[in-house]
Image (cartoon, rainbow, N blue to C red):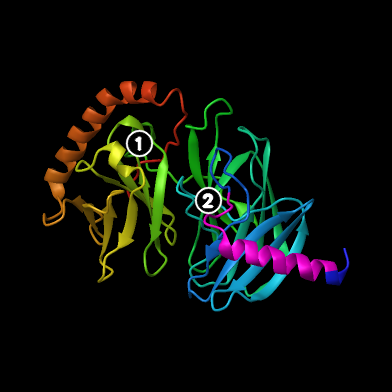
Amino acid sequence: MTIRVLTCLIATLAVAAATSPRAGADGLPVPVEDTFGEGVVAPDGASRFVSIGAGATTVVMRISLDGGKVDDYTTVDGTYTIPAIAVDGTASGVSADGETLALINPRRTFPRDDTDFLVYEANRLRKPMAIHLEGDFSFDALSPDGETMYLVEYTNPRDYDDYQVRSFDLATETLDPEPILDSEEDPDEMRGLPQTRVTSPDGRWEYTLYDGGGGEPFIHALDVVEGATVCIDLPMISPGKTYGATLEIGDDGTSVELFDNKRVRRAVVDADSLEASEPGSPPLEGEAADADKTSGISAGLIAGGAALLSLGGLALIRRSRSRAA
């Protein structure tokens, strides 16, 4: 491909990416449409990263949000894309410091035998780190400094509801042999599809809303600095109200607010205690919180069977319910 032809192609792809209504991304255990898309916006808000297939090649671009100029681009053999981490198309893959960009080879089927990633220096899209892992993985998050990549490993080839969270050290290029788990919690209790995500202002916490799989919805909070997880129960909202819902950081940065698809605020999460309450109500603490969670889990288990039937056999993504140390 000549430089002139490639330049014209890049310009065409940039226009298509800038005008597309949705992101082309795939990091979930089910195929996500890989097409021209919005990609993922850099933390400083100055540019967005987009990956677009061009035949047997992937074009990776950094596009200025001020005017749509292509500030940098590169090409790589094979198919890679910005990873999606929720069914609403929420994309991820850029570290909070803006210096690391991660791409994933999108799946076409479940399961798959191996998974490939590319990791770039975001400010200079050249010579990526190629990562090949035996097994079926999806992308979850990057640490703020871009030194750790968090992955979800699917351990049962017949059921992607069986999974564990793993961390990959990008400096040593090694996968931590121990999954991120908490022996005090039962990972089987939390089920559901990730609906949307929001990141804390400092990039430390990734808050992901799950519909609960017919049980009680919850927010899965991943501490990408310490490598720990916390599950935040949401007894004040029904599973149906999570579809099309959004998570937003409160104006003062000390809370996470949950809005349903009609923009009704349904819950507020205290960023310090990581407990949820209805708007205008204080969050539960101590024994009261534990009692409420036990009640919510019981109700969720009773409702789970009927909900799974109504989903027509759709497999649900299970997330570990664990507490930070």
Please name the residue shown 62% across and 32% down the image: 111
Where is residue 233, by image quadrant?
Answer: top left
Which marked residue is nearer to the observer: mark 2 or mark 1?
2
Magenta stretch: helix, strand or loop mostly: helix
Residue 314 position within the rendered picture, expressed as x and y whole percent measured from the top left: 46, 28
Task: Please state the horizontal and vertical placement of residue 265, each as a whole percent of the image.
Answer: 22, 54
Q: Secondary structure at mark 1?
A: loop
Tell which residue pokes out farthest to the right in this image.
Answer: 2
Q: Is residue 200 above or below residue 192?
A: below
Q: Is residue 110 left or right of residue 317?
A: right
Boundaries of the magenta span: 5-25
Give the CA separation, mark 2 to mark 1. 21 Å
Q: Which amino acid, mark 1?
A: Met
Contact, CB < 8 Å: mark 2 with mark 1? no
Does residue 188 belong to the magenta stretch?
Answer: no
- Does residue 237 appear in the picture of this structure? yes
Residue 287 placement (x, y as % from top left): 13, 44
Please name the residue that numbered disc 1 is placed on: 190
Q: Which residue is mark 2?
A: 84
Mark toward the start of the polypeptide (2 vs 1): 2
Q: Is residue 324 in sight in this rendering?
A: no
The residue shown at (76%, 63%) is: 75
